[in-house]
Amino acid sequence: MMELPVINTKSKTTVSEALFSQPVNDELITQLVNSFVSNSHQGTKAQKNRSDVRGGGRKPWRQKGTGRARAGTIRSPIWRGGGVTFAARSKSANPKKINKKMYKSAMRSILSSFAGNNKISLTKELILKNPKTKEFLELLKKIDFSQGLIIVNELNSNLELASRNIPYIEIIEVNFIDPIKLLRHESILISEDSLPKLEELLV
């Protein structure tokens, strides 16, 4: 039976062992992170070849009689301002695939790693009456959570507005978790009402 501490009640709650007590697979985590980072690139970064460079539709001078070398366009690679001969293309054009089963297993491995190192805590629902950063900081101090990732079931406007100017706190809805957001932080705080959704997503 797996239990996690509830920091604002000084108690413990039984949680899914499938989510928080899975053997950690570092190789699978690395594969997930690499594929996620690669696939998050837009794939639009590239040099321009002669067909991509604007202009150059008119022949700069006649073919014969000028004494100069033949030229068909001012956008030739040998001209200043012309296209690149072997223009580099973004490598992100070929996405790295990882299937759902591997994705879920890697995400559970990350959560299990945090839980095994006592870096995951639970909390009751976070409620703010006003979208005030000061009020949110007081709430964090009250529940004794100073920095890390907070996962909630639903991110209301008060929480979003009050937390966005705090550099050491990130708060997201459970539907939008990803490996980078999890691994970016030293500790994770999960609202109890988001646990069923988290289990639905990853188990």
Image (cartoon, rainbow, N blue to C red):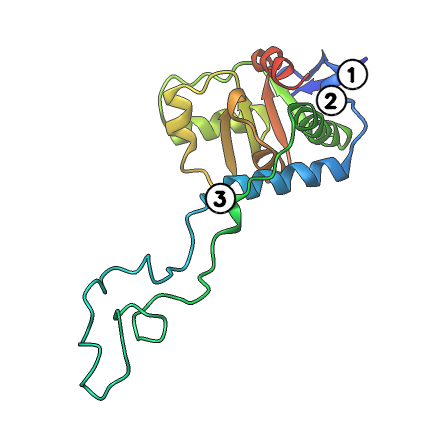
Up the image or down, 191 lies above or below 165; here it is above
- The residue that label 3 is drawn on is 41
- Amino acid type, callout 1: Met
Q: Left or right of 50: which side holds 29?
A: right
- The residue that label 1 is drawn on is 2
**Frontmost residue, 93 versus 100:** 93
Between marks 1 and 3 in the image, the one whose residue lies nearer the viewer: 3
Disc with the residue nearer the chain's start (2 vs 3):
2
Disc with the residue nearer the chain's start (1 vs 3):
1
Quarter the C terminus occupies:
top right
Between marks 2 and 3 in the image, the one whose residue lies nearer the viewer: 3
**Frontmost residue, 50 versus 108:** 50
Residue 162, how many percent across, how many down?
39, 29
Q: CA distance from mark 2 to mark 3?
A: 30 Å
- Amino acid type, callout 3: His
Up the image or down, 175 lies above or below 178; here it is above
